[in-house]
Amino acid sequence: MIVIFEDSFENGLSKIKDPALAKRVVNAIEKFKSTNTLRDISGIKAMQGYTGFYRLRMGDYRIGFSLEADGSIILLKFGHRGEFYKYFPKNYA
């Protein structure tokens, strides 16, 4: 799949201080790139009430993304779960 990074996602990544968490995020991005379907990745759920928006759970952190009609993935938001759901997906819909 084609993976596209939004500025808001990159801003969330820049705040990571834990090297283990950074490595998990890199591994998740590689999974997105290497898979043909979201079913191959565990921990993904569709966001209720928002068509095409999903989140990937990584412990206390979340990656928010949208799946486009052409099969590409747009990574929109990364953050701690306490702040993540305040902004995603309603600020991106």
Image: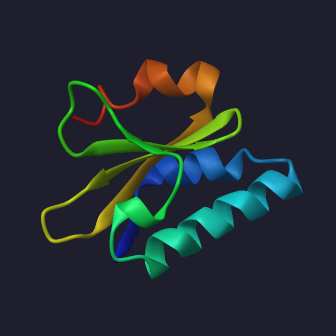
Quadrant where the C terminus lies?
A: top left
Residue 57 picture location, percent across and down: 57, 41
Name the residue at the left extreme: 69
Quadrant where the N terminus lies?
A: bottom left
Residue 81 picture location, percent across and down: 60, 27
Residue 21 picture location, percent across and down: 78, 52
Left or right: 13 in relation to 36:
right
Is residue 67 shown above or below 16?
A: below
Q: Which residue is drawn at 34% across and 59% down?
A: 74
Left or right: 33 in relation to 58:
left
Quadrant for residue 90, please give it: top left
Q: Which of 2 and 6 is in front in this view?
A: 2
Q: Which residue is drawn at 60% across and 37% down?
A: 79
Is residue 75 shown above or below 46?
A: below
Give the color scheme: rainbow, by chain, secondary structure or one colour: rainbow
Q: Residue at x 29, y 42 (%)?
A: 53
Q: Which residue is drawn at 32% across and 32% down?
A: 47
Left or right: 70 in relation to 5:
left
Residue 39 picture location, percent across and down: 38, 60
Is residue 28 shown above or below 80?
A: below
